[in-house]
Image (tube, rainbow, N blue to C red):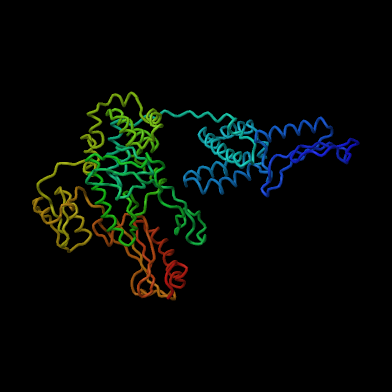
Amino acid sequence: MTRGGTAQSRQPNGASSIYLGKDGRWHGRVTVGVKDDGTPDRRHVSRKTRPEVTKVVRELERQRDKGAVRKAGQSWTLATWLTHWVENIAAPNVSENTIDGYRVAVNHHLVPGLGAHRLEKLEPEHLERFYKKMQATGSAAGTAHQVHRTLRTALNEAVRRGHAVRNPATIAKAPRLEEDEVEPYSVEEVQSLLAEAGKHRNAARWFVALALGLRQGEVLGMHWTDIDFELRVIRVRRGRLRPRYEHGCGNRCGRKPGYCPQKINVRRETKSVKSRAGQRPIGVPDELMALLRRHKEEQGLERALARDLWTEKGYVFTSPVGEPLNPNTDFHRWKDLLKAAGVRDGRLHDARHTAATVLLILGISDAVVDSIMGWEPGKSARMRRRYQHMTGPVLQQTAAKIGALLWAVPAEVAEETGSRAAVRSGPASVDSAVYLADLGGRRLAFAARQHAEQVVAQWSEDRPGQAVQVEEMGREHWEAGGGAQLIRHEIPDRRMVHHAHAVFLTGGERLNVGSPPRWSTWAWDFELDLYTDLPVRWHTSRRSGQEIEAHVRGTDEDAVSSAYVEACAQAVDRARHPGRHGDPAV
């Protein structure tokens, strides 16, 4: 057989071939592997001259021998590969928080900025120019660095699967990331923070952060079963995840999912901590354990106040209705605490730096520090350098001062913030007597007479005609009667609470037409059936006789009025369409 006027002998199977085609061009074919269906993967090239096609054929053979030939099949752009990688490869195999970071890097930065490039033609210079542009348009160096790490991970997977020959992200220079020096809070700053925290609910949450250095997720994910009050140990087992919401109203409210009145969290609330070192027991000081006991008692009172609105999930730190705290809300509470305490601004994670530095000053051994902070072996030395700060203000504090760091409140601070901060910040001396405010048969015990007298005076204004008085009793006698946990060290909270209530029949008609739909009353925190400290809270419920009730109450009258309309609308819809709301059919 002749081709191009020259006799050709048959080449062995799999060998490369070069020939002159009928179109007048030189062609080459190189076997580089096997396709997915088992047939030989022969690549075709074409050039005007034989030397040109020979050069390309030899280059293909060299790439084949090195295992660097791109896999045959779909020709990926960076956008199509990243989208496929993040949703189908990464999402099922990484944690929820990690995939959130990947999605932001891919969807908000990489696809809009580099997505049109073909995967095999992406160059390191493209990436470096892109990172520079990101920073020029306002992105932080840390954001650009996170984008670089995400791209490097995605392209490593493309190379491993044969969709790309090389990974340009391993060649490109990553954005320079300078780690900011963190200055931990001083003794005085911590004292101010904790004195201010003592005036708010969930005060123990900040004591745990500053005393033990737990991460935010570890604190918010803590359950009561993780605390051993007898052994005085906290076992860190899980971390709180950021919630992700979807509409519970069928997307009828017109708001974003996170602001939907019936929003549904579609993400699990917690996950196991990220490493074996992270799952650790931590010894708890007696003072902090006492604060946690007091916090548990306060949570029990909140549970009673919330009644049917409470959702019991076992968390140590919760919303006023038992739900786990949202990490974003917790972050803003930290910022509010810094402002209220007059302390310089800082990250919530700086509390962890502060706790690590305290351990350094106290001379705690490295092994114990690693265990408390949850650092993995092999990384602990680097983490200690990062978290333990030998700054001037810290070195000036003595070990004795650190020992009293978290629970010693200066006299002027205690006088300024009142008894609430003093009581929550540590044990206080107690009188031998208690003072009982007798409010028409209801008796409340107070440590100070003036508090009992103030409550009696205000109660008389709210409910004229009821018999009230202040009675003194020995503390031992009061505690012997089971009232040890009912001695108050402060004035109970009192506020105007607005209520709304309606009952609907199965057809949607209102049943309680003879009673007022709304009313307002002064309520104290010990009046469980009337009091609330929430601006508004509503829900609907089904009675045993199939009627639907709408309940609304709160301290914001306008919000209660608005919520009443929404609650009634849901109650009517629930009465008419029980299956839509998961109720049994009538």
Q: Where on the picture, by quarter, is residue 33?
A: top right
Looking at this rendering, what residue extends furthest in the right direction?
A: 5
Q: Where on the picture, by quarter, is residue 387?
A: top left
- Residue 304 higher or lower than 503, as above or below: above
Toward the viewer: 166 or 5? 5
Q: Is residue 531 left or right of residue 127?
A: left
Total labels: the figure holds: 0
- Residue 345 higher or lower than 96, as above or below: above
Could you say where residue 299 lies in the image, as x and y percent from the top left?
Answer: 28, 52
Residue found at x 74% / y 42%: 42
Q: Where on the picture, by quarter, is residue 6?
A: top right
Could you say where residue 475 lies in the image, as x and y percent from the top left?
Answer: 10, 50
Could you say where residue 510 lies in the image, as x and y percent from the top left?
Answer: 40, 74
Residue found at x 32% / y 62%: 308
Name the quadrant of the C terminus. bottom left
- Residue 456 higher or lower than 278, as above or below: below
Toward the viewer: 44 or 244? 44
Q: Is residue 22 left or right of residue 374?
A: right
Could you say where residue 1 lies in the image, as x and y percent from the top left?
Answer: 88, 41
Toward the viewer: 453 or 425? 425
